[in-house]
């Protein structure tokens, strides 16, 4: 179903006339234009909808270190190209062969757009080879960070670790960053849909149209008994049915728990595990 068709289904729930286009100059069309995308995102985030699941692989993007010089507050790194850092950021350096003491994590102070200082760093070895590479990392708590894909609405799995999995806490989402201790990323997520993208899952479309009708009702008519009835139908009938059918079409087969997992250790000790 198209955006226009879904809006007209939602309006039909309210007993409102159909609209010819989202851009029409009337209250119903303006309400549809206002609420369509926010409500769509809300319903998409509410469940692991199979049709909206997407997979993404990523590796850290390491930048070559181009040159070093001594500085009163540390060691200055002269990149010769924009580094994209800000004062207070933290980076991780690896593969520097001449100054191995620089390999590791450092807070930085920005000198200019192409140079920064490794705070409190000192040269520990003779000789200097302009090699090694660096990547920006979280300030504390996690080893690495990745930008989420632009169309990511909700993260489901990271490197086979699912959201809400109490057995493994290997990642966290903060803003549009995913923080993890892994240097590679296998991501499964719910993707955003383009506003003009047709919905092919009929049960999802029905659930979404009903939730959209709730939002339209409050804008066009104000909160009424009809609004409450539509919300109840969405929460108790239509949405649960759509989620149940969708889940049965994509139920994931779980493997055996690792021998040393928290779950098995708790079972062996007869209660919550205490390290």
Image (cartoon, helix red, strand yellow):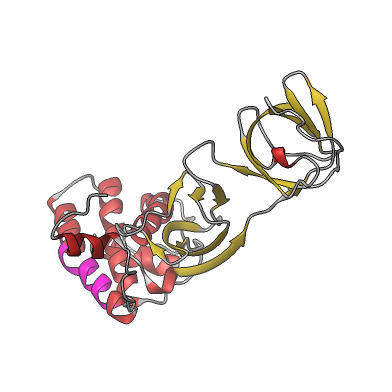
Q: Nearer the viewer, residue 31 or 138?
A: 138
The answer to whether one can see residue 16 in this image is no
Q: How many marks?
A: 0
Q: Position of residue 56 (x, y in %)?
A: 55, 66
Task: Give how far across and how far down residue 16 sits, in percent.
Answer: 28, 60
Relative to 241, does residue 106 appear above or below in the rendering?
Answer: above
33 or 97, which is in the foreground?
97
Taking the image as drawn, is residue 262 in sight? Answer: yes
Q: Image height check: is 9 above or below 130? A: below
Q: Is residue 78 left or right of residue 118?
A: right
Residue drawn where x is 76% and y is 18% of the image? 72
Q: Is residue 239 magenta?
A: yes
Left or right: residue 169 versus residue 134 is left
The residue located at (34%, 69%) in the rendering is 258
Residue 25 covered by magenta stretch: no
Magenta stretch in the rendered image: 236-245
Q: Residue at x 36, y 69 (%)?
A: 49
What residue is rendered at 52% in x and 58% in y? 151
Instruction: Give the x, y percent position of residue 53.
Output: 44, 69
């Amino acid at each position: 179903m198209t955006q226009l068709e879904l809006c007209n289904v939602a309006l039909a729930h309210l007993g409102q006339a159909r609209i010819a286009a989202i851009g029409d100059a009337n209250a119903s069309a303006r309400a549809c234009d206002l609420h369509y995308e926010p409500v769509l995102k809300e319903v998409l985030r509410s469940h692991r909808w199979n049709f909206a699941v997407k997979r993404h692989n990523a590796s850290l993007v390491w930048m070559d270190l181009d040159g070093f010089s001594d500085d009163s507050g540390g060691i200055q790194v002269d990149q010769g190209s924009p580094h994209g850092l800000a004062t207070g950021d933290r980076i991780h350096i690896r593969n520097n062969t001449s100054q191995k003491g620089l390999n590791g994590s450092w807070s930085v102070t920005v000198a200019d757009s192409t140079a920064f200082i490794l705070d409190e760093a000192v040269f520990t070895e003779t000789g200097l080879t302009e090699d090694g590479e660096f990547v920006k990392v979280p300030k504390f708590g996690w080893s690495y960070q990745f930008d989420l894909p632009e169309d990511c609405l909700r993260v489901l799995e990271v490197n086979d670790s699912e959201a809400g999995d109490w057995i493994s806490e290997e990642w966290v989402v903060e803003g549009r960053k995913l923080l993890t201790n892994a240097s590679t990323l296998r991501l499964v997520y719910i993707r955003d849909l383009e506003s003009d993208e047709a919905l092919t899952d009929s049960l999802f479309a029905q659930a979404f149209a009903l939730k959209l009708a709730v939002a339209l009702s409050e804008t066009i008519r104000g909160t009424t008994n009809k609004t409450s009835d539509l919300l109840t139908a969405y929460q108790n009938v239509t949405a649960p049915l759509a989620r149940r059918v969708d889940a049965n079409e994509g139920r994931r087969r779980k493997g055996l728990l690792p021998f040393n997992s928290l779950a098995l250790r708790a079972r062996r000790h007869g209660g919550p595990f205490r390290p």
